[in-house]
Image (cartoon, grey):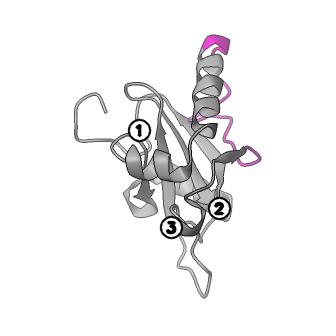
Amino acid sequence: MQPRLGNIPIVAADPSTNHLSPSWRVARLKLVSPHGWRDIVPSKLLEIRAKLANFESMTWNDILVTAKKRNHSVSVSRISNEAQNHLSSLNLFDVDEVISLHLTGTERIWGFRQGAVLQVLWWDPEHHVCPSLLKNT
């Protein structure tokens, strides 16, 4: 990642919007591997849609504070080099943290938060964006 000069960091958990429900933007969604969405089978896509719809019934506080063991922010410095390189390729040098949303087992959706909106980036079925040291997480 390139050094930031005078940029205002985009932080994952803006407390002033934690009372709001999430919404999604998909313009930066990565389609190709690694962490791409292109190869998801239709049945899995339906599961993901249902999970995202369920998140919409919650607030960011419910998602990131109450359920923080499953969903949480992660410093960009802790994610894989591939993920960091993808952020760089999108000129997202001001993103300091990304959000991990737990789906099932090792499956995660990753993005960065701007207010109440999650800019969705990656589909991570095997928890490779930020490998966990804990088994099956």
Q: Look at the magenta stretch and give its main secondary structure.
A: loop
Q: Nearer the viewer, residue 105 or 127?
A: 105
- Specify whether residue 116 is in view: yes
Residue 30 in magenta?
Answer: yes
Amino acid on which the number 2 mark rests in the picture: Gln
The percent position of residue 136, horizontal first and vertical second, equals: 28, 28
Q: Residue furthest right?
A: 27
Tell me the residue at 49%/62% (across/down).
97
- Crowd around label 1: few <14 · some 14–19 · many ≥20 (10 Å): some
Helix, strand or loop for disc 3 = loop
Query: Is mark 3 in CB contact (under 8 Å) with mark 2?
Result: no
* Residue 53, quarter of the rendered image: top right
The percent position of residue 99, horizontal first and vertical second, equals: 50, 51
Q: Nearer the viewer, residue 66 or 107?
A: 66
The percent position of residue 124, horizontal first and vertical second, equals: 50, 34
Helix, strand or loop for disc 2 = strand
- The numbered mark, 1 or 2, whose residue comes first in the sequence reads 2
- Specify whether residue 40 is in view: no
Residue 118: numbered disc: none
Q: Which residues are magenta?
A: 25-43
* Separation (CA) of disc 3 from disc 2: 12 Å
Query: Which residue carries the number 1 mark?
Result: 128
Amino acid on which the number 3 mark rests in the picture: Asp
Residue 114: numbered disc: 2
- Crowd around label 3: few <14 · some 14–19 · many ≥20 (10 Å): some
